Image (tube, rainbow, N blue to C red):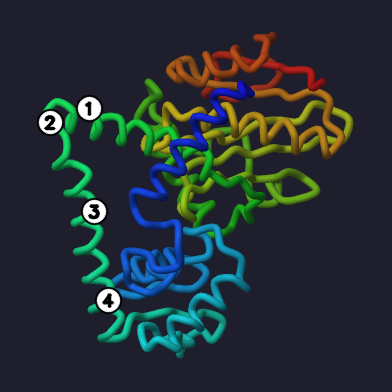
Amino acid sequence: MNASDIRQVRSFNRIVAEGIGAIDDRFLGRGRPMSESRLLWEIGVDGADLRTLRARLSLDSGYLSRTLVSLERQGLVVVQTQSDDRRVRRACLTKAGLDERTELERLSDVIATHVLESLSDEQRRRLITAMGEVERLLQPSLMRFAIEDPNSDDARWCFKQYFAELNERFESGFDPAFSLSADSRELTAPEGALIVARLRGNPIGCVALKFHKKSPAELKRMWVSASARGLGLGRRLIDEAEKHARQNGARVIHLETNRTLHEAIALYRQSGYVEVDAFNTEPYAHHWFEKKLP
């Protein structure tokens, strides 16, 4: 990594922290650190489950618990256990918490206005355009990858999006019942694995593997949400799948794909996959690829 690039990122981080008043424990002059104010904003007017807050902000349970205790002591938050499922705890803002959140919104608008009013119309346009690009390009650093139960709600949601897209793009549509199997048993260790990518706790992509002992592993069901395309997520999903395949002893990966998936075909080739003769009878496939893992 280029040292001057790293210095530029650090300089950018410092000026942003200074500009939004995040360098002391009195964020926006409200007498509490930025982490507590951000949590008030994330809880929102409707409240939020603690596990959702942990995932969205990438917080460990201990830190989230301590921050919530502090906000409870200030009379801004109450944490309750759901009556229908005692494993689920939910944070809600009190009347004082809602008022404080409104004030934080007002003060944040004041800071944003101050940033913009010192610029000309052209400078504002350039800054807003640059901010949008920076926000988008920062998203890959916030993406998280984890092995997922293929029967979980998020996994099923990913599969539903994947099947719907294939049905729309394939010339003859797509029916998973006619495709070679990749059921939940085959995507659960030791038979296989499902990797889900998340951004702020929300699923944005997936890739699956099927293992066959000493025979090549199969890469299946790779999908990237339209909202995350252009950020390199497909390449990172392949990297995660290959890493997991190596850890499970695979030395070769096979995959097949449909000719209408031009972006996927280009990505596979860029990632070192070589087109080979058909090695299965997948009815929706037109191209078969192989990669030997280093």
Up the image or down, 73 lies above or below 33; here it is below
Residue hosting label 3: 111
Report how far apart the C-alphas of labels 1 and 3 lie in the structure: 18 Å
SS at circle 4: helix
Q: Residues within 10 Å of mark 3 (few under 14, many from 20)?
A: some
Residue hosting label 4: 100
Q: Which of pointers 2 and 1 lies earlier in the amino acid sequence?
A: 2
Q: Amino acid at mark 3?
A: Ile
Q: Which of pointers 1 and 3 lies earlier in the amino acid sequence?
A: 3
Q: Which of pointers 1 and 4 lies earlier in the amino acid sequence?
A: 4
Of residue 81 and residue 187, the one placed in the foreground of this image is: 81
* Residues tagged 3 and 4 counted as in contact (Cβ below 8 A): no
Q: Which of pointers 2 and 3 lies earlier in the amino acid sequence?
A: 3
Image mark for residue 65: none
Q: Amino acid at mark 4?
A: Glu
Up the image or down, 62 lies above or below 181; here it is below
* Residue drawn 63% across the image and 53% down it: 148
Report how far apart the C-alphas of labels 2 and 1 lie in the structure: 10 Å
Q: Residues within 10 Å of mark 4 (few under 14, many from 20)?
A: some
Q: Amino acid at mark 2?
A: Ser
